[in-house]
Amino acid sequence: MSNTKYVFVTGGVTSSLGKGIIAASLAKLLQERGFSVTIQKLDPYINIDPGTLNPYEHGECYVTEDGAETDLDLGHYERYLNIPTSQANNVTTGRIYQSVINKERKGEFLGKTVQVIPHITDEIKRRIQILGETGDYDIVITEIGGTVGDIESLPYVESVRQMLWEKGEDNTIVIHLTLVPYLAAAGELKTKPTQHSVKMLMQSGVSPDILVCRTEHEISDDIKRKLALFCNVKTEDVIQSIDAETIYDVPNLMLDQGLDEVVLKKLQLSSPLKPELKVWNNFLQKHKNPKHEVEIALIGKYIELQDSYKSITEAFIHAGSTHETKVNVRWIHSESLTPDNFAKQLEGVNGILVAPGFGDRGIDGKIKAVQYARENNIPFFGICLGMQMAVIEFSKNVLGLKDAFSTEMKKDAVNPVINLMESQENVTEKGGTMRLGAWDCKVEKDSKTYNAYKSENISERHRHRYEFNNDYLKQIEAAGMKATGTNPKTGLVEVVEITNHPWFVGVQYHPEYKSTVLKPHPLFVDFIKAALKQSKK
């Protein structure tokens, strides 16, 4: 019998209040108190996972060690807690229904009418408790996506109601994150939206134990008492979450508000440890008081929604803090880079990162950005598609293979220096079929990559279908681009570098997924170091 406690985080009034950040901040404080904590996200959409979603729809698709394509909130969970998440940490309505329908087809419910209650809710409860039943965690925090009142969220709220009844109030609590808006015309904060949101939650049979109120202005004791009275909670259970300068301030703000103490009291847990956040605050101190500045051009196809590159921009923050450096990102749409303007658009940057992506839109701009970095000795970092573009640019302009290309964009490429992976040739379905999750890589000792990692053997996460074509390896290496990292089993080229360039590294994997506050990713740290050197020239 597991003794795991469950904390549910729901959202009210509006979306985008930051349930993921509140959940991660609470988890961080509980971790500092000595508890083993994990967080999971329940997403109400019917996609099996976000892997097939356009980044404009849902932001970045985050990949776990075990190859799950997940919501970007799992990135926040890992960056805060410094522990890996897995397939079990992200559940969608699509996955729930798929599982129940598969069981129905196998005859597991033979003779029964399959319904939302109990079959769908039982499957949701089973998924919620998978992490708890491992015995690895004292507390599982479950963030429920969407806003209370959404039709899609109803089965999840009902499942929470059932778990509250089954496990008892000492083992399960509900935190409701809501908005307390400020009306400038009236000059006051308004509690009515929160009252209505809580009322809607209570109509579903769930009464919140704690209210976390997002606000632009300080919430007075009078307003806290009013919210407590109308929302059926104690005054000390009304927690203010005021707008923060950075998401990394939120754990400190929640500590000041005593969120962790209220949660532990309700779960009847105690700990002699107090959250000190020493390493965390050391990071914050350096982040907020930089001694240097660099400007990095991020070349991407989805820059209108910067959440599409969330892990990359956060990795810049982690690496920047290491060097006490503010990293300013110059967002450049790859479609906007032309042969006539690319030099002007990239002028003055201290580093260039060509971002991941799929499809042929904006490819010429990415190739131009690589060329500019290579010819002007600007530190260059290519990730996944960015690495592939570096290989194509080098093959075209240095090797002289003018028709070098990737078969992703040009199926009949004369010189397919980037080709479909052999294992992908018979794949017809899109979802969850790429090369995903953690794979090993052996790094050459005499390389920039080795200097960054200080290790020959590394493991990194992948998300791709196309790869470096080894038929061209000898030619490319002879011309000065070296394969400095390869998969020891498959021979797949994982890392390329240009040896006579100050810092030119392309990686087939996604290092940004593994960068955390406590462990900034070594390649990003080294890239920012090179950009800093460039800025002083």
Image (cartoon, helix red, strand yellow):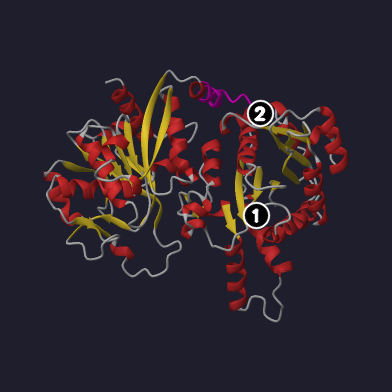
Question: Is 33 above or below relative to 64?
Answer: above
Q: Nearer the viewer, residue 511 or 346?
A: 346
Mark yes or no: residue 487 visible. no
User: What is the magenta range?
Assistant: 274-285
Callout 2 crowding tier (Cα within 10 Å): few <14, some 14–19, many ≥20: some
Furthest residue to the bottom? 111
Q: Residue at x 83, y 38 (%)?
A: 227
Q: CA distance from mark 1 to mark 2?
A: 28 Å
Picture quadrant where residue 349 is located: top left
**Of discs 1 and 2, which sits in the foreground?**
2
First in sequence, mark 1 or 2: give its number.
1
Q: Tell me where residue 430 appears, x and y as whole percent.
A: 42, 65
Q: Main secondary structure of the magenta part?
A: helix
Question: Is 341 above or below relative to 132?
Answer: above
Would residue 279 be counted in the magenta stretch? Answer: yes
Residue hosting label 2? 253
Mark yes or no: residue 483 visible. yes
Type of the residue with mark 2: Leu
Q: Residue at x 64, y 39 (%)?
A: 22
Q: Residue at x 61, y 62 (%)?
A: 93
**What mark, if any, has residue 128 been given in the picture?**
1
Type of the residue with mark 1: Ile
Q: Tell me where residue 336 appears, x and y as whole percent.
A: 34, 46
